[in-house]
Amino acid sequence: MLKADLYNFDGKKKEAFGLPKVYEVKPNLKLLTQAVHVYEDRSHKGLARAKTRSEVAISTRKIYRQKGTGGARHGARSAPIFVGGGAAHGPKGIKRILRFSKSQGNNAFFTALNYKVQSAEAVFVDGILKIKKTKEAGDLIDSIVKAKNWKNAKNIIVALSKANYDASLAFRNVSGITVDYFRNLNAYKVYLAKGVIIDKDALGEKEEIGKEKKEIVKEAKVIKKAISKNVKTNSRETAKKITRESTKGRVVKQKTRRR
């Protein structure tokens, strides 16, 4: 069982407790590096674009004749070989979007969290909602930083549960700290943070999110099936109406011809 350090809201250390079985994952460093690479790639737009020889604002006439000069054969000054010419193989402004599945993202997150817990860079706090002032929040962070020998008190994430997010009013003014929901954490944020302080009440939120998403997917599938059935029935009814109208017109024409 993976055990993590637990602190009280006033900075006093309590007995270590075991994390749920969901957080016990075999370390997969390749998946973690892949997740970090994907998050870094998607953090910037990647819309850089260079002008080609047909887009550069320069003359397109041939600089000198083809033969008889003794020099190399050249065309216009817009060629990539000249200064001020277009780029031959520059960026084209097309963003290549990298993706990975939700299960891969969850496994990478659990791997990063396990790494932080084992290296004493992740700590859980009990009763964090009792912190009402910024001074109390700063004292809690200072005590944890000293106890864990974190070199700098910067780049620290305070992850709160949805029910206890009012405590963010006390933590948001502390320098070098970012406050976020625990459900919004991912492998990239956890791995690159110097330290992670997590609300103990937020441990079950990841499971709840998974259940909510499954229920939403099921509801969406049921709605799609109902819509497809309605569309099919409506299309059949409209097709029958069209055939009836077309057959009525044919019968009238036949009768008029016989007369």
Image (cartoon, rainbow, N blue to C red):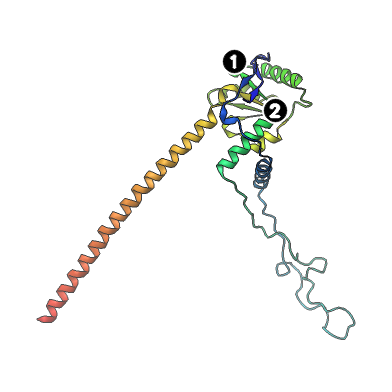
Q: Report the residue that reaches farthest toward the right.
A: 70
Tag 1: residue type?
Answer: Lys
Q: Quadrant of residue 8?
A: top right
Residue 97 picture location, percent across and down: 62, 52
Is 80 rendered above or below residue 144? below
Real-space Cα distance between discs 1 and 2? Answer: 28 Å
Q: Report the residue that reaches farthest toward the left.
A: 259
Residue at x-position 76% and y-position 19%: 146
Quadrant placement of the N terminus: top right
Is 223 rendered above or below residue 247? above
Q: Quadrant of residue 74?
A: bottom right
Q: Of discs 1 and 2, which sits in the foreground?
A: 2
Residue at x-position 25% and y-position 58%: 237
Q: Residues within 10 Å of mark 1 (few under 14, many from 20)?
A: few
Is 56 rendered above or below residue 76? above
Residue at x-position 41% and y-position 43%: 220
Q: Quadrant of residue 60?
A: bottom right
Tag 2: residue type?
Answer: Gln
In the structure shown, which secondary structural element does the residue marked by tag 1 occupy? helix
Mark nearer the N terminus (1 vs 2): 2
Residue at x-position 60% and y-position 25%: 19
Is residue 186 or residue 28 the one in the foreground?
Answer: 28
Residue 160 picture location, percent across and down: 59, 26
> For residue 130, which numbered disc appears in the image?
1
Residue 70 picture location, percent across and down: 90, 82
Is 55 rendered above or below residue 11? below
Quadrant placement of the C terminus: bottom left
> For residue 118, which numbered disc appears in the image?
2
Residue 58 picture location, percent across and down: 76, 69
Q: Report the residue that reaches farthest toward the bottom.
A: 68
In the structure shown, which secondary structural element does the residue marked by tag 2 occupy? helix
